[in-house]
Image (cartoon, rainbow, N blue to C red):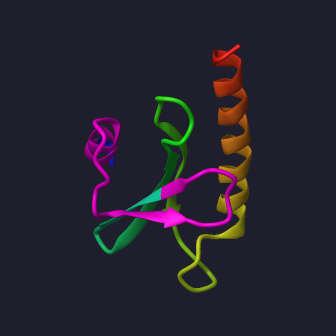
Amino acid sequence: MGHTLHLIQTGDTPKQTKALTGFSVAVREIRLRQDKEAYRGAYTVSLGDKVYLLHVFHKKSKSGISTPKQDIEIIRQRLRQAERMEAARNE
């Protein structure tokens, strides 16, 4: 995941990323598999010139392929916090 984040920081959009819908700004998800397990990392580059890594989790969905609601809520909370941090930087 670290290598993928490095690519994102240098302006690339790696193929293992996907847009997440339903957020006030663009949020993307890093999608990785290792040893038959799924791992996800949600981030945004839409706030200033920073990459904000919002949440990383081991995906163990109990309801199909969608991202669990608990993880979506964590992403929402951290996105709001990142928006506040970015606003404070620009004051």
Q: Is residue 32 toward the left or the right of residue 19 in the image?
A: left
Q: Residue 18 appears in which quarter of the rendering?
A: bottom left
Classify 71 as above or below 69: above
Residue 69: give x, y in percent of width and height: 71, 68
Q: Residue furthest top?
A: 91
Classify 35 as above or below 7: below
Q: Residue at x 33, y 49 (%)?
A: 1
Residue 90: give x, y in percent of width and height: 65, 17
Residue 52: give x, y in percent of width and height: 52, 37
Q: Residue furthest bottom?
A: 64
Q: Which residue is drawn at 49% across and 56% down?
A: 28
Q: Is residue 22 magenta?
A: yes
Classify 45 as above or below 73: above
Residue 35: give x, y in percent of width and height: 28, 69
The mark tally for this picture is: 0
Q: Residue at x 48, y 41 (%)?
A: 45
55, 16: nearer the viewer: 16
Quadrant location of the C terminus?
top right
Classify 83 as above or below 61: above
Q: Is residue 66 toward the left or the right of residue 1 in the image?
A: right
Q: Which span of residues is magenta-colored?
A: 3-28
